[in-house]
Image (spheres, grey):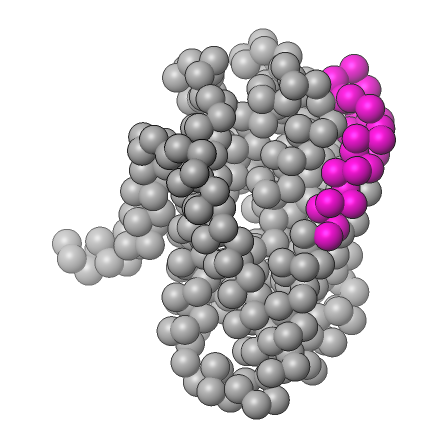
Amino acid sequence: MRRVLSRWVDPFVVVLMVVLVAGLVIPVGPGAQRVVDVVSDVAVTALFLVYGMRLSTREVWAGLRNGRLQGGILASTYVVFPLLGLLVAWAVVPLVGAPLAAGMLFLALLPSTVQSSVAFTSVARGNVAGAICGATVSNVLGMLLTPLLVLWLMPDASGAAGAGAAGGLGGVRTVLVQLLLPFVVGQLLQPVVGDWVRARRWLTLSVDRGTILVVVFSAVAAASSAGVWAGTSAWVIVALLLVSAVLLAVMLAITWWGGAALRLPVTDRVALLMCGSKKSLATGLPMASVLFPVAVAGVVAVPVIVFHQLQLVVCAVLARRLALRD
């Protein structure tokens, strides 16, 4: 029994679920939430600093030049996902109502998440350099592409076009300062400390998993404090979970077997799986607040939050299983 449990039950997933529940039930005041947000930002910055110190510059350039992987990530994020989002939004209107169905479409138009995609790629022994390049490019392009797609596909729900542009500039600044800058600093330190960091895989693994836990608690606690769940029934949450599970399963299958069709090596397939199947909560919530009227933004954000938590739990399990491969 112990061997079975150790094989199928990941302690990290158990801790992740505990943290998720804690974010839902523990009241976090405005002052405490600001502290949690700062801790989350510091953790993400530390994550990319460590990656910069760990990866050789040769690996980074190889990741940037990997056209099939980078093209696969962008196609998954901004072609396949939006097409599925249109289909899902049309199909689930009778199930969850038009506003939440619009939220499912908005979810499909978002860029890939950066920190969790990279962290899970690392845990799964995938191409970390390719994941960093792909997820970062996805986010930078998403600051322009997502508002344009929203205005094109959701004209009745979206707000002013200028608001989307303003939000996009802020998002680019966040990506550059919080993610790329520490990674570049890490790359500058890499010739000195790279061998030491690479010899201590536990360090990267601890930073990976610690960052994910902090980000999850921060996001869920912020949503709970903002009253996102107040007008949403338990049945609707269950329905959104089921719909999100189907959407996530389809994207995981497409990215994994699509990587095989592109003849990518396993490490690149892992990066495509982790980057191409995810959507960014950190980008989605601020964009929702500037792209939609206040009365719509809160409802549209609910599917994004539900999908985000589900993708973390599922990909934590997948990353552990993939890490055990020969």
User: Which quadrant of the figure has residue 230?
Assistant: top left
Q: Quadrant of the C terminus?
A: bottom left
Residue drawn at point x = 61 percent, y = 54 percent: 114
Q: Is residue 71 visible?
A: yes
Task: Give coordinates of residue 129: x percent, y percent.
Answer: 64, 70
Q: Position of residue 297 (x, y in %)?
A: 64, 22
What range is drawn magenta here?
147-173
- Tell whether position 165 is magenta: yes
Please state if 66 lies on the left or on the right of 22 as rendered: right
**Residue found 43% across the figure and 38% down from its top:** 31
From this viewpoint, is residue 127 visible? no
Q: Estimate the x, y position of residue 324 in percent, counting from the top left.
A: 39, 66
- Who's the residue at 45% across and 62% down the image? 208
Q: Specify whether 17 is left or right of 199.
A: left
Q: Which residue is nearer to you in this view: 137 or 218?
A: 218
Q: Most extreme residue toward the left, as rendered?
A: 1
* Count of labels in the image: 0
Find residue 218 and report its image quarter.
Answer: top left
Q: Which quadrant is home to the N terminus?
A: bottom left
Q: Is residue 13 magenta?
A: no
| x 74%, y 33%: residue | 83
Residue 10 vs 159, above or below: the answer is below
Q: Please, is residue 54 above or below residue 75 in the view?
A: below
Secondary structure mostly seen in the magenta stretch: helix
Image spot of residue 319 (x, y percent): 45, 58
Specify whether 57 is left or right of 153.
Answer: left
**Nearer to the camera, 269 or 52:** 52
